[in-house]
Image: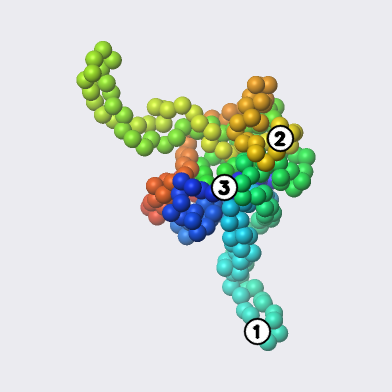
Amino acid sequence: MKVVILAGGFGTRISEESVVRPKPLVEIGGYPILWHIMKIYSTYGLNDFVICCGYKGHLIKQFFRDYRLHRSDVTFDVHDGVATTHRNGVEPWRVTLVDTGDGTMTGGRLRRVRPHLGEEAFCLTYGDGVADIDIDELISFHRRSQALVTVTAVRPPGRFGVLRIDPDGERVLGFREKSNEDSDFINGGFFVVEPQAIDYVDGDAAVWEREPLEAMVAEGRVAAYRHRGFWQNMDTLRDKHVLEDLWNSGSAQWKTW
């Protein structure tokens, strides 16, 4: 099964980082968040990736061009122009990098990589979110559902404390930390998609989460896989710091490898 990763957006909410690199290359623990996402899938034997590039996509290409070299011990015979690799520390990844345009929307990016996907179901996710999701269980759920698309439903992590207020007055009765039970489910990415779903995308301006998914929802063809474990996106610099702190403290729950 192939894995498609949307990695072409401008990352405007984390402009402190994205001004010099695409958001999927922003590092957590010395490695791009894109690498962390790929490691999650690789844990479950999914090693064939299609990356939808856009804004500063050439930097993503350069990362994978040099990845093997950076992770290996090597001897260069400068005179003969021969390089000998002594230790290969890279994963068994096959990575297809597709320029899907700077201004293309999420649905349009998916449509543009259609020729690289074949006729089997594939995984799809965003290039800025990690989770301790069981990918095998997600795929099994999708197959049982017989849906065109399965979306992973998550509850966003608590950010602010919750006030307990007297329902019959204006008095604050107490404070407590917000929990995941205090919010509705949201789209957490980590989709499983049948190729026919791409037919619902009209063109580059189509936003995957709007008209295409809404049309399939109206037909009852979208299933929700509820993930109640860890999930965190990296939308802002604050989010990056949260992930960095978890990684440095040894508490990175998405680290399943």
Residue 255, percent from left and from top: 50, 49
**Real-space Cα distance between discs 2 and 3?**
19 Å
Which residue occupies the foreground of this view, 152 or 98? Answer: 98
Q: Which mark is residue 78?
A: 1
> Which residue type does callout 2 highlight?
Asp
**Real-space Cα distance between discs 3 and 1?**
40 Å
Please determine whether, in this image, residue 155 is positioned above or below residue 82.
above
Q: Dot 1: what SS? A: loop
Q: Dot 3: what SS? A: loop
Question: Is residue 95 in sight in this rendering?
Answer: yes
Residue 3, percent from left and from top: 66, 45
Q: Are marks 1 and 2 in contact (CB under 8 Å)?
A: no
Judge from the rendering whether residue 254 lies leftward or rightward of residue 120; answer left or right.
left
Residue 88, percent from left and from top: 62, 67
> Which residue type does callout 1 highlight?
Val
Q: Which residue has dot 2 on it?
A: 202
Q: Nearer the viewer, mark 3 or mark 1?
A: 3
Which residue occupies the foreground of this view, 190 or 228? Answer: 190
Q: Which residue has dot 3 on it?
A: 9
Instruction: Characterize the local packing of mark 2: few (<14), some (14-19) or many (20 or more) Cα atoms within 10 angstroms.
Output: some
> Which residue type does callout 3 highlight?
Gly
**Real-space Cα distance between discs 1 and 2?**
52 Å
Residue occupying image coordinates x 62% and y 26%: 214
- Mark 1 and mark 2 lie on one chain; the one further toward the N terminus is 1
- Mark 3 and mark 1 lie on one chain; the one further toward the N terminus is 3
